[in-house]
Image: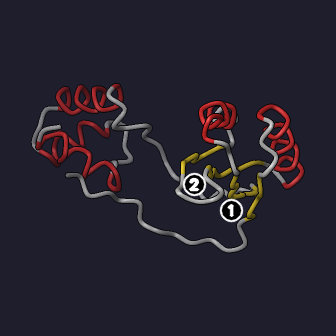
């Protein structure tokens, strides 16, 4: 990635303009053409550097239940497990950890009954029975801005 890509990423990760023409606004801010910024963002997305561009909403204020889930998944079943978990639209994060519980994911759904139902489905479809839920009891807001090397 070149310096222009780094500059675009550094700006949009926490300052994406909320307007009818956000890429034109970025053009004015960064000094590159709107077309160049659009093309570069498209390429960064195609290259997997940008996963998505979207808002982060407060799920609790919207009435949703949020749960962190942790599973003990045998190494030879990690791919299957991750693929199955990622099928659910309520999964917002899914990552590998160096821990006894090696796969952690977050689930945002309508209520605790839905959490229980989906966890049951995941256990049934993957055969991974050591899966615990850690319901959110308090919200913490942390910055998710990343330094772009």
Taking 99 as reference, is 25 left or right?
left
Q: Residue 65: name its quadrant.
A: bottom right
Q: Residue 34: name its quadrant.
A: top left
User: Label 2: few (<14), some or many (≥20) within 10 Å?
Assistant: few
- Please provide percent x and percent y for residue 110: 80, 49
- Please provide percent x and percent y for residue 142: 47, 68
Which residue is at 82% across, 42% downward? 118
Q: Give yes or no for contact between labels 2 and 1 (Cβ–Cβ under 8 Å).
A: yes
Taking 52 as reference, is 88 left or right?
right
Which residue is at 35% across, 25% downward? 46
Q: For the image shown, how many numbered marks are present on the structure?
A: 2
- Please provide percent x and percent y for residue 53: 42, 40
Q: Is mark 1 on a helix, strand or loop?
A: loop
- Observer-nearest residue: 84 or 64? 84
Q: What element carries label 2?
A: loop
User: Quadrant of the image for the N terminus?
Assistant: top left
Which residue is at 62% across, 37% downward? 82
- Observer-nearest residue: 97 or 65? 97
Q: Mark 2 points at which residue?
A: 57
User: Label 1: few (<14), some or many (≥20) within 10 Å?
Assistant: few
Q: Mark 1 points at which residue?
A: 61
Taking 75 as reference, is 55 left or right?
left
Tell me: residue 47, above or below residue 144.
above
Q: What is the distance, in whole Å, between disc 2 and disc 1 at their CAs? A: 9 Å
- Please provide percent x and percent y for residue 72: 70, 51
Give the numbered dot on residue 95: none
């Amino acid at each position: 990635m070149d310096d222009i890509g780094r500059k675009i990423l550094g700006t949009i990760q926490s300052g994406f303009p909320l307007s009818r023409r956000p890429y034109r606004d970025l053009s004015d801010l960064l000094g590159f053409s709107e077309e160049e910024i659009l093309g570069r963002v498209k390429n960064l997305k195609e290259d997997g550097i940008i996963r998505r561009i979207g808002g982060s909403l407060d799920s609790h204020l919207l009435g949703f239940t949020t749960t962190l889930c942790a599973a003990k998944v045998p190494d030879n079943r990690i791919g299957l497990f991750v693929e199955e978990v990622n099928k659910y639209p309520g999964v917002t994060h899914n990552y590998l950890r160096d821990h006894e519980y090696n796969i952690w994911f977050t689930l945002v759904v309508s209520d605790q009954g839905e959490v229980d139902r989906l966890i049951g489905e995941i256990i049934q479809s993957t055969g991974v029975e050591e899966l615990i839920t850690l319901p959110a009891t308090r919200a913490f807001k942390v910055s998710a801005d990343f330094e772009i090397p």
